Amino acid sequence: MSESPITKALSARRLAGEMSFIPFIAAGDPDLPSTIRLIQTLAAAGADLIEIGFPYSDPIADGPVIQSSYTRALGKHLKLTDLFATIEQASKTISTPLVGMVSFAIIFRTGTRSFLEAAKKAGFAGLIVPDLPGDEATEFAALTKEFGIDLIQLVAPTTPAARMDKILATASGFIYCIAVAGTTGVRDAAAHEIEAGLKLLREKTQLPLCVGFGVSQAAQIEALRGKADGAIVGSAIVRHLDGAETPAGFEKSLASIQKFAEQLAAAAHHS
Amino acid sequence: MSAAITHPISQVPDAQGRFGEFGRRFVPETLMYALEELAQAYQSARKDPEFSAALEGLLKHFVGRPNPLYFAERLTRMSGGARIYFKREDLNHTGAHKINNALGQALLTMRMGKTRIIAETGAGQHGVATATACAHFGIPCTVFMGEEDVRRQKLNVFIMRTMGAEVRPVTSGSRTLRDAINEAMRDWMSSVKNTHYIIGSVVGPHPFPMIVRDFQSVIGREARAQCFEMIGGLPTEIVACVGGGSNAAGMFYPFVDDESVRITGVEAGGRSPKPGDHASALSFGNKGILHGSYSYVLQDEDGQTSDVHSVSAGLDYPGVGPEHAYWKDSGRVQYTSCSDDEALAAMQLMARTEGILPALETSHAISYTLKRASEMSPDESIVVCLSGRGDKDLNEVARLTGQQI
């Protein structure tokens, strides 16, 4: 089986003894044209993969920062077709693979096949569906394979070893390792608490292991070195968009996101 | 997702939590272990005579069960048709059916060795029931409640706090029941090791819809036996209001295999059938996913949950339990809706004619029943689940009718 663009990008870093840096933003916050600029900025700052959140009205896995970002985007009547059109425009201008973070409520409503067609056309290399756990994912995983889109599965600190096998059976791209039991958000997730879980996963799979939820600083990325292959940073980036509603506010947010992303990328990339 | 109707129709869900095609588990991985743990604890509790004895004892001595099946003589005469009976869940301790489930799940919490309980509440009845169960057992309790519902249901907020519960107003989204469930789930994500989430309706991921239905089925079991005593057999029709659907599930489930019994669920028709004006997920919604379960949902074409409206906080919810979706698609239960105004009128009529003040939720079922009974013959009978008392709604009713309390 040939490696997917996602696995390829992450493996290249791993082979070089480096970690991957995966930033997250929500599409449509503050608006869709800004999303294109944010994606380009993150790619230029050294992101190895960019996670794009699909705003959803009831995101139970998300903390207040990402909830607010989704609420801002939906408040402007963001529609799925416009989101896909925007990502299609953005993905053509960068080589960094894009991964969609999307609730199964949205995928199911659109129709699994129609959704995957649209995602493929927009240029998504993978999808993270946080409310479609391994047990429920069998059917959808088969379909994503047909479309050549990776289905990234999540493993939580509460996941027992026996469940890991079920989850790995439907996973591709990389494994999203949740650092803390809880929602997304800026916290001090401590590397040593998930060390055992990462070790166990390493024995079970060749897929890259990336850590997210509560990862917000360069020092945390540093502490994950040798244990994980990548770090996912969401809320700590998205919170820079508070006050980005005005054009001047957005330019300021963009500049601070660029600086912050460069720092995180540097922490991840040195070997 | 393919449809499958099993016979007898009561034999659901399967081990994956499927009611036909509906139900299942659409939740973050962080919660999966807790759901499996809960399913196992419930299976073992179910077979344990000590657990059943403890629950039965509580229902008898603390709740006051069995509550009566009441023949509404004047309403029957007024409608001129079928004999109307009410299953009096309003006479339970705390004034509604919610206590049946709260006590059952509180016992499960202790069985699992968990030391904290969280709950969501809409009208406040489930919050009050959970706060009461927690006070009874001495378990710390946090109740999430939408800010809009905190306003509408001040009295229940005060009762919960008096019982020692912490009430956390939820300010996200529409600030109603749906957002309270989101917040409770988020809390549970980070507290799952020591905390049990007592969900208040037959919604959410497996095994919640099954557990809540089973604990509420005491309503239908008692009503069924009482029908044989008082009517000499099965009723012609049974009726309950449906928001998330817990009193209806508890009332209907013991009757679903009785093919001769017509079963009707009444949803909140709100101001009009226009999107945003009602909360009738079964009557107007689509198949979709909300709060970890696959059922009928009011959502837009992108899968975003719609804002809904009902005069009754307990029915103001865009989803509905997966078993109701299964009953709807199988044709076993028919679902209809009743407007805000009709519910308000039914509440007042019930108060003046029978001397019983029903909750606004229940008043939806009563409104339908009055119309329906008049079309039926006097040798037929119709049994309504009187799910709760109306005291909690009086501030809101006074406000809506321009009166002062």
Image (cartoon, helix red, strand yellow):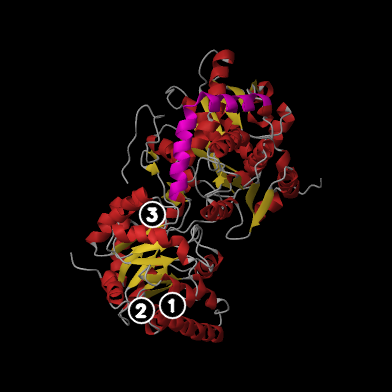
Alpha-carbon neighbours of circle 2 within 10 Å: few (<14), some, or many (≥20)? many
Task: Give the residues drawn in magenta, as a range.
Answer: B32-61
Do the dots labelled 3 and 1 sit on one chain? yes
Disc 2 and disc 3: Cα gap in Å?
A: 27 Å
Query: What residue would you read off at disc 2?
Result: A90
Query: Considering the image in quadrants, where does the C terminus of chain B appear?
Result: top right
The residue shown at (57%, 34%) is B104
Q: Where's residue A154, x and y in %?
A: 38, 59
Q: Is residue B69 above or below residue B96?
A: above
User: Magenta region's main secondary structure?
Assistant: helix
Is residue B102 in view from this perspective?
yes
In the picture, the disc for residue A35 is 1
The quadrant holding residue B23 is: top left
Residue A12 lies left or right of residue B391; in this view the side is: left
Q: Are marks 2 and 1 in contact (CB under 8 Å)?
A: yes
The residue type indicated by label 2 comes to Ala
Q: Chain of mark 2?
A: A
